[in-house]
Image (tube, rainbow, N blue to C red):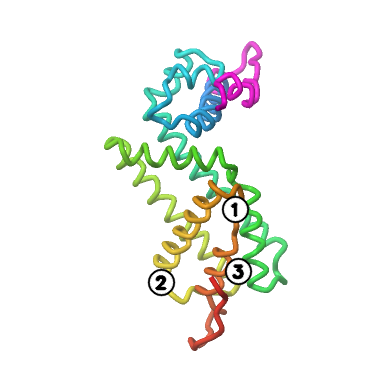
Amino acid sequence: MTSLSEVAAAVPPAPTTTPGSPVSARRTRTRQRLMASAVAVFAERGVIGSSVEELCEAAGFTRGAFYSNFADKDELVLAMIEQSIAEEYAAAEEAVDELKAHGARLAPADAVAQVLDRLNHGGRSDRTNLLAQRELLLYAARVPELRAPYQEFAAACRAQVDALVTDALAFAELEFTVPLDVALDLLMATHDHMQQTALFTGRLDPGAMHALIMNLTRPRGEVAFPRPRQEL
């Protein structure tokens, strides 16, 4: 089992602050370091099983540093969830932008494969981060005060994802064969299953996601008729 000293050693040293540096910048770095070190602690011990003292020890800070940035562990959890979702969206946006910049001549299947590959290499797909994400969501589901804030944030992100996917499909000259909401629910469920499987296999396999996307889309304006389907 990983010790807290090993966890602390794995986190990059906190940047030093020169005289006259903005306090807000220093607090931002402290906040980011606390969240970064909490990932490994939560992955190993769970949110409920981790104390504020252990989180501070892993980050190399005092309790005072923790409470100057977070009111309690609940606030830390919500901040980590928000950051994780924001980073996943940013990775997806970057993958789509890269496709639009360099993938004009790609066939739809190749374009989808490129985006999925970019996402798998750009997101937080290692086992520690995947475990921590599961722990954060389970904790938010257990704590009544966190459910509403999480749902509100997730709904706002869903709206952004809707717009991003619509833009990507328009560029690839594709359209869904089912309503957008249904398609996104299926894609998100497949993504969740892919991450869950990776917890045990140690790797993200985008095969099912690729096949699902190709089976859920068709060339824009194409008359609907049966066509050969890829195996899921």
Residue 179's disc is 2
Magenta range: 1-24
Q: Height in image: 143 above or below 115? A: above
Quarter location, residue 149: top left
Count numbered badges in the picture: 3
Membership of 19 in magenta stretch: yes
> Could you tell which of marks 3 and 1 lies nearer the N-terminus?
3
- Residues under labels 1 and 2: Cα distance? 27 Å
Task: Look at label 1 and name its amino acid.
Answer: Leu
Which residue is disc 3 drawn over? 171
Local packing at callout 1 (Cα closer than 10 Å; few below 14, some 14-19, many 20+) is many
Label 3 or label 2, whichever lies nearer to me, is 2
Task: Provide the secondary structure element on which disc 1 rests.
Answer: loop
Give me the residue at 67% from left, 69% from top.
110
Q: Height in image: 213 above or below 146? A: below
Return the residue nearer the eye: 199 or 228: 199
> Could you tell which of marks 3 and 2 lies nearer the N-terminus?
3
Which residue is disc 1 drawn over? 204
Return the residue nearer the eye: 94 or 57: 57
Q: Height in image: 50 above or below 215? A: above
Task: Provide the secondary structure element on which disc 2 rests.
Answer: loop
Residue 9's disc is none
Label 1 or label 2, whichever lies nearer to me, is 1
